[in-house]
Image: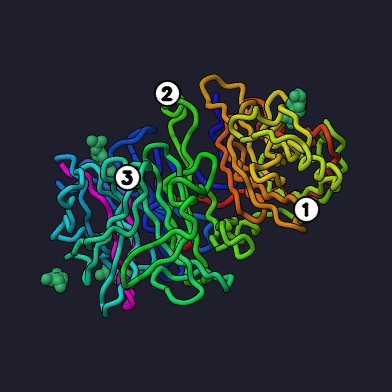
């Protein structure tokens, strides 16, 4: 039996939920829409759920924003994005699956912009506003992005994911009024072999400042992130590059790390993500869909499936110049209950130590590790041994300099455990290479749940400690390494390590080095999740 309780954060009430849609900030409220099936815990009859929050943490569910009730979206009100015009109007473009199973783009807008809750949505009478262009499959045309301003006055540009053969592409359209569109001759970008691009996201990041940028922002000190959700393997990939607004071409900084073949936003269970610009705090905020890794029959039995991740800020990592930095929004810290437990532990090779916490099911953990320098030199002199989180055997496979890290959602006897750890190996270039992994092979005694080890490499620069931040919420663990350069979301199904029985450990399974762990642990309180209508707004 799986745990169906998420203490801190939120289950999107009832049944099935998936992609975040049209996030925006309006009159003091953060709005999140999401793909939702009100009728079952599996995908179907997709409707737009709607929730609002003042702080991205405590949420209020509102009535559905849009349901499948027109010929152009009767088979689903699929994913879309909001564009806020300079005069405050909100243009919501979304994909509809028609009565003929053709993917078209539709326009919706709020009936009453003065309403902070944006309760009523109007579907434009001229829908659909876009149909698949010649050469594009009728089932390969979905998920319009937020628009950005083009080089001409009053011109907006936006992109829609598709594919030609096995090449993933981002089509670009221009519009002045969001009802009439023109397809540009050139795509924004294309990457062979990556298949259908879903939920494309395209936005600027500052290479100088520490704030986020509005989607239309461009100029010196700016790079552009292209993100695609790969339908073929259900992974969210991104690449950093430069965008030429006049030629309307995006070019990756490093072609070897192009979108779909290089970096992933999250190496765990995380898909169909989408960012928005938060004008209140001048930051770019990322949402993502955490799906299930158990069976559909288990989801039907528990009556719901999937949750939204805790929102993350996204910044360009000036130090590496190659990675984004993702970090839980600062508001999550308002759930920290009191002062942290602070511990420093010296861990000899092959040791594990319990860190006493009353209930370790809802935690915010910051941990850093100092590795014996002599041992680090040893790894560089050792023969090359290829290491990869997913194929090198998990936390029980010991090497000279790893694994070491924390063990979350474990019971006292370690019959269930989820280790999240670093592993230093010799990289192809002969230098030490650090990997960040989350091992779910022993997370659950329940039958039928996926048992994989997630992770990837993470840059650790000279002078940096190995550091991680973990948000632990019963059956979800969101893990951030080196300030958010590499991120892993785990969806786990503990049967024994639940609630008061959950424990937290630190461990060092390296054979050749001792490690000093410095850990700060906060208990987290639950977020307040309520349903509309309310008396006390
Ligand atoms: C689909 O969901 C809507 C509510 O969003 C409901 O009114 C309708 O009956 C559902 N249709 C089917 C076929 O389940
Ligand atoms: C629009 O919303 C405002 C604020 O909630 C409300 O006062 C007003 O009555 C609404 N207008 C209409 C036409 O519903
Ligand atoms: C939108 O703009 C196009 C092109 O400028 C124009 O032909 C069309 O009439 C406009 N539609 C509306 C509803 O204003
Ligand atoms: C450390 O390695 C041993 C031996 O393989 C294994 O039994 C143990 O579970 C590992 N520790 C963790 C935290 O995975």
Answer whether residue 413 is visible to the viewer in this image. Answer: no
The colour scheme used here is rainbow
x and y percentages locating residue 34 in the rendered image: 38, 49
Q: Residues within 10 Å of mark 3 (few under 14, many from 20)?
A: some
**Label 3, label 2: how far apart the Cα atoms are:** 34 Å
Q: Main secondary structure of the magenta part?
A: strand
Is disc 3 in contact with disc 1, using a CB cutoff of under 8 Å?
no
Q: Is residue 267 left or right of residue 105?
A: right
Q: Quadrant of the N terminus?
A: top right
Residue pointed to by mark 1: 340
* 191 within the magenta span: no
Q: Quadrant of residue 174?
A: bottom left
x and y percentages locating residue 434 in the rendered image: 68, 45
Q: Quadrant of residue 423?
A: top right
Residue pointed to by mark 2: 297
Q: Residues within 10 Å of mark 2 (few under 14, many from 20)?
A: few
The mark lying in front, picked from 3 and 2, is 3
Q: Which mark is residue 167?
A: 3
Q: Is residue 268 above or below residue 466?
A: above
Q: Is residue 129 above or below residue 267?
A: below
**Label 1, label 2: how far apart the Cα atoms are:** 40 Å
Is the residue marked 2 within 8 Å of ligand 1, measured from its CB?
Answer: no
Q: Which mark is residue 54?
A: none
Q: Is residue 438 left or right of residue 155?
A: right
Q: Nearer the viewer, residue 37 or 246?
A: 246
The extreme bottom residue here reads 153
Residues rendered magenta in the picture:
79-99
x and y percentages locating residue 194 in the rendered image: 38, 43
């Amino acid at each position: 039996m799986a745990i169906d309780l998420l203490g801190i954060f939120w289950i999107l009430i009832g049944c099935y939920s998936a992609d975040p849609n049209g996030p925006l900030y309006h009159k003091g409220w953060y709005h999140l829409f999401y793909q939702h099936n009100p009728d079952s815990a599996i995908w179907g009859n997709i409707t737009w759920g709607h929730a609002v929050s003042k702080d991205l943490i405590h949420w209020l569910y509102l009535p559905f924003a849009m349901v499948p009730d027109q010929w152009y979206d009767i088979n689903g009100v699929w994913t879309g994005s909001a564009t806020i015009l300079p005069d405050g109007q909100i243009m919501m473009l979304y994909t509809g699956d028609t009565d003929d199973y053709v993917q078209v783009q539709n326009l919706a807008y709020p009936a009453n912009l003065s309403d902070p809750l944006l309760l009523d949505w109007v579907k434009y009478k001229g829908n659909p506003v876009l149909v698949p262009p010649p050469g594009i499959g009728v089932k390969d045309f979905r998920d319009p992005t937020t628009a950005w301003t083009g080089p001409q006055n009053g011109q907006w540009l936006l992109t829609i994911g598709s594919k030609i053969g096995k090449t993933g592409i981002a089509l670009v359209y221009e519009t002045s009024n969001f009802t009439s569109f023109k397809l540009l001759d050139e795509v924004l970008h294309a990457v062979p072999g990556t298949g259908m691009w879903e939920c494309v996201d395209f936005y600027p990041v500052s290479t100088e400042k520490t704030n986020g940028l509005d989607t239309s922002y461009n100029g010196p000190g700016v790079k552009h992130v292209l993100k695609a959700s790969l339908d073929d393997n259900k992974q969210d990939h991104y690449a950093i590059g430069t965008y030429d607004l006049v030629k309307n071409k995006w070019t990756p900084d490093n072609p070897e790390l192009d979108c779909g073949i290089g970096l992933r936003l999250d190496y765990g269970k995380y898909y169909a993500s989408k960012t928005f610009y938060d004008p209140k705090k001048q930051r770019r905020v990322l949402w993502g869909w955490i799906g299930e890794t158990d069976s559909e029959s288990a989801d039907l039995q528990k009556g719901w499936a999937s949750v939204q991740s805790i929102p993350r800020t996204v910044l360009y990592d000036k130090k590496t110049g190659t990675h984004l930095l993702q970090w839980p929004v600062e508001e999550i810290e308002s759930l920290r209950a009191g002062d942290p437990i602070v511990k420093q532990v010296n861990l000899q090779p092959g040791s594990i130590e319990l860190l006493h916490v009353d209930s370790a099911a809802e935690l915010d953990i910051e941990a850093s590790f100092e590795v014996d320098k002599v041992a680090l030199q040893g790894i560089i002199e050792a023969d090359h041994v290829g290491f990869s989180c997913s194929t090198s055997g998990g936390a029980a496979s010991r090497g000279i300099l790893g694994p070491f890290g924390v063990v979350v959602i474990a019971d006292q006897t370690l019959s269930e455990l989820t280790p999240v750890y670093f592993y230093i190996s010799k990289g192809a270039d002969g230098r030490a290479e650090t990997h960040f992994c989350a091992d779910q092979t022993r997370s659950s005694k329940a039958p039928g749940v996926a048992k994989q080890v997630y992770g990837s490499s993470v840059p650790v620069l000279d002078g940096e400690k190995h550091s991680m931040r973990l948000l632990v919420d019963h059956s979800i663990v969101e893990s951030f390494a080196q300030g958010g350069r590499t991120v892993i979301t785990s969806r786990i199904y503990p049967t024994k390590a639940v609630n008061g029985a959950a424990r937290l450990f630190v461990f060092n399974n390296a054979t050749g080095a001792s490690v000093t762990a410095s850990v700060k642990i906060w208990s987290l309180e639950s977020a307040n999740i309520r349903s509309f209508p309310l008396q006390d707004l």
